Amino acid sequence: MADAAQRLTTLAEELLSTPIPVRVRAWDGSEAGPPDAPVLVVRSRRALRRLLWKPGELGLARAWVAGEIDVEGDLYEALDLLAELIWERDDGSGKSVHPLRDPRVRAAARELLALGGPLPPPPAPAEELRRHTGRLHTKRRDKESISHHYDVGNDFYSLVLGPSMVYSCAYFPDPAATLETAQRDKLDLIARKLDLRPGQHLLDVGCGWGAMAVHAAREYGVRVTGVTLSTEQAAHARKRIAEEGLTDRIEIRVQDYRDVHDGPYDAISSIGMAEHVGAVRYAEYAADLYALLKPGGRLLNHQIARRPVADEGAYEVDEFIDRYVFPDGELAPVGRTVALLEEAGFEVRDLESLREHYALTLRHWVARLEENWDAALRMVTPGRARVWRLYMAASALSFERHRIGVNQVLAVRPESSGASGMPLRSRVWGA
């Protein structure tokens, strides 16, 4: 098996009908492919057995998380070069198909079997969440999904996110700004869009580690109620609030947004939370927030969006993201989000895309993780750290290539008279 790399390269080129753009190093030490390209390291034949038994993204993801495949060189460049292998492509008829689910892969199974060995695949890495059963987005199932992603240790999140502990797209009016400055600017942009004023009461849905709550209370003098399903987030937020001397203005609850009934609030922020709501619950989510808001009050909904597809019923959740990153998370086209908010009674007043800003944010997070890799491995398993590195780098490229986007939707609950309370001027956020 001293020629494993050449055999892998030849097989890949036959399947893709194009020269493979990276260099391959196999478990036997052999190499093949362009000499100056990033190196795809196949450390174990087990990786091939995973692809045989689970063609597509999930098989690749399991091999990556288990450390059976790796990349030497620039990870972004490697992912970009391998995009047609990793992501779906048009099969020529207008239908998207994952290249590793192409019928020709089945025809190549004999060669893969010879390379990978006849044994069944190893069990899935421990970091993989077993597929849920039962109805989507029940309160219990949502709490389990949130815990899987967020309750992995506040120290690890601090290492990746930095002191701000903001886990959503930053705002870079200056592309050279630091991550901390860009996150502060994002929080302030939201506060200005909501027109926060002293004495008002803000509901922060999916409050995370408390950054928005602290910023709104400290800089704008409002009272804040923050809700999260993560016990570790809530513990960190409460400690932070106490250190800031803001316990008289901020309350943090471990609570499902569907169980908040103590409105009305003057304003509501929902930052990077609605992706967890799901299509089956989104109308309920919009109606609940509408009911919790005072007439004339504003909602800022900050949410990742996917591109629309011709057959929305055929949309499938990304298997890697679903099993390893955001279980039960769903992305919707921004038009659908706007329509559901309006169906609930909101008037949508502004929509701003921050797509390029999220790509910059993710590159900052990846850089922090890579710079602190040894420390990360003391906090979480190697598999968990590898999940994060891959998903953040791949997501950065997805935003840059316009595969996904992120939008801030500003909506108002009109007064009974129809008045919106919005100023008669161009987009200037503030009093």
Image (cartoon, rainbow, N blue to C red):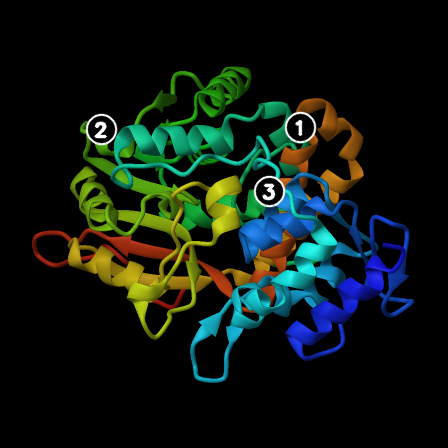
Mark 2 and mark 3 lie on one chain; the one further toward the N terminus is 3
The three-letter code of the residue at mark 2 reads: Asp
Residue pointed to by mark 3? 120
Which image quadrant for residue 352?
A: bottom left
Residue occupying image coordinates x 26% and y 34%: 138
Residue farthest bottom in this picture: 93
Q: CA distance from mark 1 to mark 2?
A: 34 Å
Q: Are marks 3 and 1 in contact (CB under 8 Å)?
A: no
- Circle 2 crowding by C-alpha within 10 Å: few under 14, some 14–19, many from 20: few
Q: Mark 2 against mark 3, which lies toward the viewer?
A: 3
The three-letter code of the residue at mark 3 reads: Pro
Q: Are marks 1 and 2 in contact (CB under 8 Å)?
A: no
- Place of residue 334 in the rendered image (x, y in percent of width and height, measured from the top left): 36, 63
- Place of residue 347 in the rendered image (x, y in percent of width and height, measured from the top left): 22, 59
On screen, residue 123 versus residue 112, left or right, reads left
Q: Secondary structure at mark 3?
A: loop
Circle on res. 381? 1
Image quarter (top left, top right, bottom left or bottom right) of the N terminus: bottom right
- Report whether residue 431 is seen: no
Q: CA distance from mark 3 to mark 1?
A: 25 Å
- Place of residue 209 in the rendered image (x, y in percent of width and height, measured from the top left): 50, 29
On screen, residue 290 versus residue 29, left or right, reads left
Q: Mark 3 against mark 1, which lies toward the viewer?
A: 3
Residue occupying image coordinates x 39% and y 58%: 316
Residue occupying image coordinates x 29% and y 39%: 137
Q: CA distance from mark 2 to mark 3?
A: 46 Å
Mark 1 and mark 2 lie on one chain; the one further toward the N terminus is 2
Q: Are marks 2 and 3 in contact (CB under 8 Å)?
A: no
The three-letter code of the residue at mark 1 reads: Thr
Q: Secondary structure at mark 2?
A: helix
Circle on res. 259? 2
Q: Nearer the viewer, residue 43 or 208?
A: 43
